[in-house]
């Protein structure tokens, strides 16, 4: 259906939002109704037929949980399942907005929005039948890296977040263990942003010493210190118009944090050796392997800086929680390295695939990548067997230590099953006997955990 002929209902308790949307949509839709109180929704849906509803996710500012929006979304779908619903959300509610897609919303729009973007989303929503497939093809992999690949639900959620936040200028904090692909996510956000044609500047701030921190990030004037032989712009200036990616931000000192906070608040840098402020226009992306709960400890990290860098957070799941993505990535790396080393693309035997899925990957995607590169180099035949798949002892952690880190009961069970299967070489009879469950029960758990 065309937007021009559509009847649209907008439900939001913010009068300014209702006014802005009414003025925007009036020339583009057939009919528009605005409503502040969601309690009137059932009566409105009985009185009038709507093609599309634009629904806020939060109506009670004291709660601000998004549950109100989900509640009314369910009500709409009960009363009028054919109506397309687009949710209105804020940056901090992206996870809730993704939940709304699973509840039947056609899409969501993030406040504040570009008018053209909102019109495009509404036009799209009218043409959708059910939830669309989420796909976000990232650019070609270079020979040392991987495309951002994943078919698991967790990665589909990541792709959707990238798609939604990339066109904005929101500051993003990317969380995840080492080797999960935080830099790939940062690059994808830049490539799908309005700044894509401008520089993407990466800085490993955790590796900068106190003396180098200001010079590298903010620049210096000739003679500012012993080795300053010429004027030099810092990384923030180099990223002007584009994106700056500060990796390992969880490892910088409180003194460095204060310097960085000042730059972000004032949107300007002062080169070492001068007093002249230089305006900057950058989009900030940060990443750390430090869990957010630890990062929030003020003896380690300033909370005012966390709020500044964390308009939206994206948490990348560890590889052990991505199910069959392990095999998808293994085949991908096998093809990449076969091409690099001028070999035919090898097949992977069932025993090799089982070994790949049963391993816990403390080094995540990076560890799998190097294991597949080694396997391709060392393989003598066209089929890779389990003996060809070797994992680095550098990443190996004692099982007891791994179990101690896991607090989720399901994850404890999954890790235990993995350990016992590896111990018995994939023999299900012996594994089920040691676990104290039947083979049938073990089969069910293998399916449950994607093993």
Image (cartoon, rainbow, N blue to C red):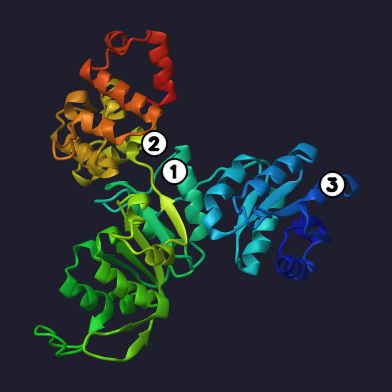
What residue is shown at x 31% (from left), y 77% (from top)?
238
In the rendered view, tell whether residue 59 sits above or below residue 428: below
- In this rendering, would 88 be left or right of 212? right
Point out residue 157 in the picture as x, y percentages from the top left corner: 49, 45
- In this rendering, would 96 be left or right of 322? right
In the rendered view, tell whether residue 116 sits above or below residue 83: below
Q: Residue furthest right?
A: 47
Q: Which residue is mark 3?
A: 45
Q: Quadrant of residue 245?
A: bottom left
Q: Which residue is mark 2?
A: 322
Look at the numbered disc 1 and give the secondary structure of its residue.
helix
Q: Is residue 267 visible to us here? A: yes
Q: Marks 2 and 1, Cα distance to the nearest angstrom?
A: 8 Å
Marks 3, 2: nearer the viewer: 3
Label 1, residues with CA under 10 Å away: few <14, some 14-19, many ≥20: some
Point out residue 366 in the picture as x, y percentages from the top left corner: 25, 44
Tags 2 and 1 in contact by the CB under 8 Å rule?
yes
Tags 3 and 2 in contact by the CB under 8 Å rule?
no
Q: Quadrant location of the C terminus?
A: top left
Q: Quadrant of residue 223?
A: bottom left
Q: Is residue 281 visible to us here? A: no
What residue is shown at x 72% (from left), y 69% (from top)?
16
Point out residue 305 in the picture as x, y percentages from the top left corner: 38, 66
Q: Marks 1 and 3, Cα distance to the nearest angstrom?
A: 36 Å
Marks 1, 3: nearer the viewer: 3
Q: Which residue is mark 1?
A: 155
First along the sequence among labels 3 and 2: 3
Look at the numbered disc 2 and give the secondary structure of its residue.
loop
First along the sequence among labels 1 and 3: 3
What residue is shown at x 38% (from left), y 14% (from top)?
442
In the rendered view, tell whether residue 59 sits above or below residue 383: below
Q: Nearer the viewer, residue 330 or 181?
A: 181
């Amino acid at each position: 259906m065309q937007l021009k002929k559509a009847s649209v209902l907008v439900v939001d308790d913010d009068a300014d939002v209702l006014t802005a949307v009414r003025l925007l949509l009036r020339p583009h839709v057939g009919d528009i109704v605005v409503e502040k109180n969601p309690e009137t929704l059932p009566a409105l849906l009985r009185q009038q037929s709507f093609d599309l509803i634009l629904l806020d996710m939060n109506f009670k500012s004291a709660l601000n949980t998004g549950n109100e929006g989900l509640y009314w979304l369910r009500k709409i779908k009960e009363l009028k399942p054919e109506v397309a619903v687009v949710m209105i959300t804020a940056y901090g509610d992206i996870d809730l907005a993704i939940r709304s897609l699973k509840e039947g919303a056609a899409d969501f729009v993030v406040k504040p929005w570009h008018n053209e973007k909102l019109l495009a989303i509404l036009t799209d929503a009218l043409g959708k039948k059910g939830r669309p497939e989420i796909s976000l093809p990232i650019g070609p992999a270079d020979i040392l890296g991987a495309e951002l690949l994943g078919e698991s639900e967790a990665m589909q959620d990541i792709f959707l977040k990238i798609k939604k936040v990339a066109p904005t200028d929101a500051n993003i904090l990317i969380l995840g263990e080492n080797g999960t692909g935080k830099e790939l996510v940062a690059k994808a956000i830049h490539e799908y942003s309005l700044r894509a044609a401008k520089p993407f500047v990466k800085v490993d701030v955790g590796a900068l010493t106190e003396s180098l921190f200001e010079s590298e990030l903010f620049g210096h004037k000739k003679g500012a210190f012993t080795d300053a032989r010429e004027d030099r712009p810092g990384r923030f200036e180099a990223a002007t118009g584009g994106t700056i990616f500060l990796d390992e931000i969880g490892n910088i000192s409180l003194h460095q944090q204060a310097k960085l906070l000042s730059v972000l608040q004032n949107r300007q840098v002062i080169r070492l050796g001068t007093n002249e402020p230089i305006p900057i226009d950058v989009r900030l992306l940060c990443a750390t392997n430090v869990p957010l709960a630890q990062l929030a400890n003020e003896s380690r990290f300033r909370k005012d800086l966390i709020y500044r860098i964390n308009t939206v957070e994206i948490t990348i799941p560890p590889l052990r929680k991505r199910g069959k993505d392990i095999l998808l990535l293994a085949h991908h790396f096998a093809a990449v390295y076969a091409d690099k080393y001028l070999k035919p693309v090898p097949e992977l035997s069932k025993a090799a695939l089982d070994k790949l899925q049963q391993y816990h990957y403390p080094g995540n995607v990076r560890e799998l990548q190097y294991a597949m590169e080694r396997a391709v180099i060392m393989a003598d035949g066209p089929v890779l067997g389990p003996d060809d798949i070797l994992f680095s002892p550098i990443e190996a952690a004692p099982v007891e230590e791994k179990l101690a880190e896991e607090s989720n009961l399901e994850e404890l069970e999954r890790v235990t099953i993995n350990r016992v299967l590896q111990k018995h070489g994939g023999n299900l009879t012996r594994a089920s006997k040691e676990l104290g469950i039947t083979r049938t029960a073990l089969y069910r758990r293998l399916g449950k955990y994607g093993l």
